[in-house]
């Protein structure tokens, strides 16, 4: 079973259809049994993405993006542009320079469910369900370093404030190491609040993302308010990568 090593917020599992479809929230790694320099194509990765019904009844898959990793910043799951620490800013700048230099084959897709059809064109309404999944292939040594950089960035940008229409909002970011999913994994989460401590229109539940490494493949899935489901979905993807790409059982 997957185990969170450091405290990173809370989330409750459930017995609804998506959870039953996922199964055991754990997945073996491939370190020591797979060639660390082996890489895969965009098409190989696209075949490993989970079908949209994995995320619930009525959830539909959006456009498939192949080969866009680190070339299309519009596909980033979290924007760090507002993270400008007053002190000790150079480590963050160096993290971002290094992170932006990585390249690799990739496949990314967003699965969405709208509560009402008209909400799609309403700028004040978001989807009822939205899950972003992606797979990136690189050398094993690069994948290890990439995951370390992600941990460093989340840790460095624990609280990020930015201007919003009704005042200042803040992202509260947390990161924890997650055991039992691939060779190594991170549980990342973000909650949004107004900066005055009072209830704000920007306040939102904490949303979770898992980034896991299976050999040289980075598995990423989120962001969703149910931590247990996100971990289970990440394990599902990780098991598929290990079995179908690396040939594990």
Image (spheres, rainbow, N blue to C red):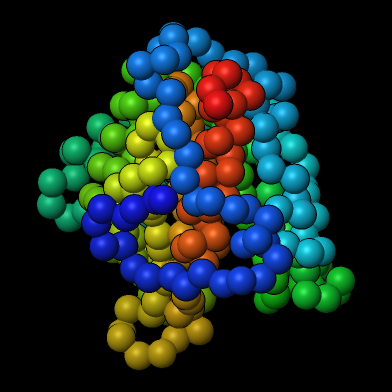
At a point 77% along the width and 42% down the height, the residue shown is 63
Whether residue 128 sits left or right of residue 214 in the image: it is right
User: In the image as oriented, which residue stretches furthest toward the bottom?
Assistant: 198
Q: Which of 160 and 166 is in front in this view?
A: 160
User: In the image as oriented, which residue stretches furthest toward the right?
Assistant: 117
At a point 32% along the width and 55% down the height, the residue shown is 4
Is the residue 63 above or below the residue 114 in the image?
above
Q: Position of residue 211 (x, y in %)?
A: 44, 42
**Based on the displayed image, in which of its 4 quarters is residue 7 positioned?**
bottom left
Q: Nearer the viewer, residue 167 or 63?
A: 63
At a point 43% along the width and 42% down the height, the residue shown is 181
* Quarter of the image where the C terminus is located: top right
Q: Which of 51 and 13 is in front in this view?
A: 13
Q: Nearer the viewer, residue 97 or 223?
A: 223
At a point 18% along the width and 38% down the height, the residue shown is 90
| Residue 25 visible from this viewpoint | yes
User: In the image as oriented, which residue stretches furthest toward the front?
Assistant: 249
Q: Where is residue 183 in the image (x, y as percent from the top left)?
A: 38, 32
Is the residue 187 above or below the residue 7 in the image?
above
**Based on the displayed image, in which of its 4 quarters is residue 50 positioned?**
top right
| Residue 73 visible from this viewpoint | no
Tally the marks: 0
Whether residue 138 sits left or right of residue 4 in the image: it is right
Q: Where is residue 182 in the image (x, y as percent from the top left)?
A: 43, 35
Is the residue 39 above or below the residue 124 in the image?
above
Is the residue 124 above or below the residue 4 in the image?
below
Q: Position of residue 238 (x, y in %)?
A: 53, 36
């Amino acid at each position: 079973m997957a185990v969170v090593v450091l405290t990173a917020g809370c989330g409750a599992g459930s017995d609804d259809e998506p959870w039953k479809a996922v199964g055991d929230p754990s997945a073996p790694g491939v370190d020591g049994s797979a060639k660390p320099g082996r890489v895969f194509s965009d098409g190989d990765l696209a075949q490993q993405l989970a079908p949209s019904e994995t995320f619930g009844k009525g959830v539909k898959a959006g456009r498939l993006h192949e080969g866009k990793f680190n070339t299309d910043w519009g596909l980033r799951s979290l924007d760090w542009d507002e993270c400008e620490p007053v002190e000790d800013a150079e480590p963050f700048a160096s993290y971002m320079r290094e992170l932006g230099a990585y390249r690799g084959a990739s496949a990314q897709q967003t699965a969405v469910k709208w509560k009402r059809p008209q909400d799609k064109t309403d700028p004040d309404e978001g989807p009822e369900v939205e899950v972003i999944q992606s797979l990136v292939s690189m050398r094993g040594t690069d994948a290890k370093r990439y995951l370390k950089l992600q941990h460093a960035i989340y840790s460095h940008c624990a609280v990020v404030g930015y201007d919003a229409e009704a005042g200042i909002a803040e992202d509260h970011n947390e990161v924890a190491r997650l055991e039992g999913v691939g060779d190594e994994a991170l549980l990342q989460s973000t909650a949004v609040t107004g900066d005055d401590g009072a209830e704000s229109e920007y306040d939102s539940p904490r949303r979770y993302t898992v980034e896991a490494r299976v050999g040289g493949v980075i598995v990423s899935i989120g962001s969703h308010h149910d931590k247990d489901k996100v971990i289970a979905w990440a394990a599902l993807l990780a098991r598929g990568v290990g079995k179908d790409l690396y040939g594990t059982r």
